[in-house]
Image: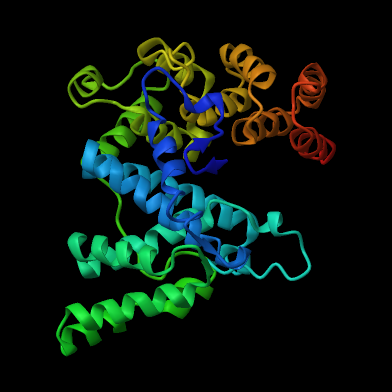
Amino acid sequence: MENPMLTFVSPTVIVGDKSQVYVAAHEMSHSWTGNLVTCADWANFWLNEGFTVFAQRKSAELIDGLDFTKVSSFIGNQSAYEAMETYGYWDSYSSLHPNVRTAAPDDSFSVIPYEKGFQLLYYIQSLLGDKLMADMVDEYIFENKYTSIKWQVFQAKVESFVDKHENAEVAREIKAKIDWEAWVYGPGLAPIHQDFTTPLLLESQAMAEAYIVGGGSTGPSDFRDYLDNKKFYSNLRVIFQQYLVQNEKRVTGAIMKKIDQDLGVTTHSPIDYNVFQQWIPLGLRTGYLPVRFIAQEICQTVGRMKYLIPIYTALLKSGQKELALEWYHESFAFYSPYAQSNLLTLINSY
């Protein structure tokens, strides 16, 4: 939870390799979008979070480069796809303007306003260019400070800014390329596909495929060069894990053992929770026992639902409901009331 000059954050964000530092950048960015200018209602929540993800990734781009930012965007995109699959691609909760009607607003909460909102802003930046985009956002925040707004205010700002800084013909072309109704109200995938793949990302996927093809006996012959010389940083490890999960039917415990021997995923220090979010549930589902110990430790020491839900779901889907209940009762007093209620509902659904 962000507040001006003070952010309450999970300890899972504070890791030794600083791989989660941009979460801090995200929360700090809320001082401008979310606090100084905020959404008028939950249907406009993307005005808070889409802008903040955009600022977070712009910071990352300036510090770590465009490749780093595009990989982060690719991972975010995958998370948005998964949320849309849960709601349904035609549900309004898969849009930037969810219609909650009489339901609890929290029911519509997901990564969609974060990631789809970011993609809209990233697309607008592709039309304006980095410098004009930065100037436009500065003006938008200054003109709307201390107010709560709806998305049409931002639309009006973009259009008036374009009219002011471009000739009439170019301004018309830019405005015609932004289908606001489709972006805001359209459910499902963003109306404009944006390619966030990079060479390093593709190499991470290729390395995962090589391990799968090796069947647990061999790994990619050149992976050490990739690891040593191309910075196999946290987000690339997540890409590697995502590829394994997406090809889970081809992944065995023997393959995971070989990966662990080469890469030390289970014993990686410091703990990389974003990688474990993929690796541990996969191990539980494929019967790779070494992950069980770290999975239990996480369930006993981490209260963040982002990491708990995948572990408990993996236990339940692999027929280990009794173990899930055992871990739940062991850690019940540690969990927040929100976690207690939601985890019990999940367990009882199986």
Which quarter of the picture shows residue 159?
bottom left
Q: Quadrant of the N terminus?
A: top right
Write down the quadrant of residue 236 in the picture. top left
Any part of residue 179 in sight = no
- 23, 293: nearer the viewer: 23
Residue 259 image offset from top left, x and y in percent? 41, 18
x then y, percent, for residue 15: 44, 21
Q: Is residue 299 left or right of residue 329?
A: left
Rendered position, 186 above or below 54: below
Left or right side of 339 for 189: left
In the orientation shown, which residue stands out farthest toward the front?
A: 146
Judge whether residue 32 can be spotted in this image: yes
Residue found 44% across the figure and 61% down from its top: 117
Residue 24's place in the image compared with 40, above or below, is above
Residue ID at (57%, 52%)? 83
Of 134 and 121, the residue lying toward us: 134
The C terminus sits in image quarter: top right
Q: Is residue 21 above or below residue 71?
A: above
Residue 297 position in % (x across, y down): 64, 14
Residue 59 image point, x, y percent: 29, 43
Residue 185, above or below 110: below
Q: Is residue 310 left or right of residue 117?
A: right
Give residue 328's quadrant in the image.
top right
Q: How many marks?
A: 0
State the scheme by which the image is colored.
rainbow
